[in-house]
Image (tube, rainbow, N blue to C red):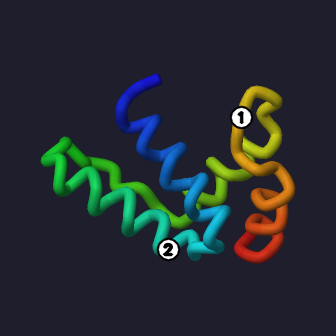
Amino acid sequence: MSMSGSIVLSVLDKAVKYSMTPDDVAELYNNIVDILEWDNDCPYTREDAINAVDYLINDKYSSIDKQAGADWLNKYK
């Protein structure tokens, strides 16, 4: 997994755990990328966060809390 992918997973795990809004998730990830001075031609969006959590709760290998993820999606989708 890429470094950016690991960061996204970590941010999403915290987002679900602490009920961060999708907008806050996108802002946090984009801020991390900016701090690291990575090329960010396509900023992470609210929809990206929602789609990623949706994918993770349906992925049998994901370590995200499935019930918390489902609750988060119901709240923000």
In this rendering, the answer to whether 39 lies above or below 28 is: above
Residue 51, percent across and down? Answer: 65, 52
* Element carrying mark 1: loop
Residue 18, percent across and down? Answer: 62, 71
Residue 40, percent across and down? Answer: 25, 48
Left or right, 4 with reference to 34 = right
Q: Amino acid at mark 2?
A: Asp
* Element carrying mark 2: helix
Left or right, 59 with reference to 5 = right
In this rendering, the answer to whether 25 lies above or below 32 is: below
Reading the image, the residue beneath label 1 is: 62
Of the numbered discs 1 and 2, the one sitting upstream in the chain is 2
Tell me if mark 1 has few (under 14), some (14-19) or many (20+) residues whose alpha carbon lies within 10 angstroms of its own.
few
Residue 55 occupies which quadrant of the picture? Answer: top right
Residue 22, percent across and down? Answer: 56, 69
Residue 76 occupies which quadrant of the picture? Answer: bottom right
Q: Amino acid at mark 1?
A: Ser
Depth check: give the residue in front, 23 or 19: 19
Gap in Å between the C-alphas at discs 1 and 2?
22 Å
Reading the image, the residue beneath label 2 is: 23
Question: Which residue is at a point 74% across and 69% down the rendered structure image?
Answer: 77
Question: Which residue is at a point 45% across and 36% down the rendered structure image?
Answer: 6
Left or right, 36 with reference to 55 = left
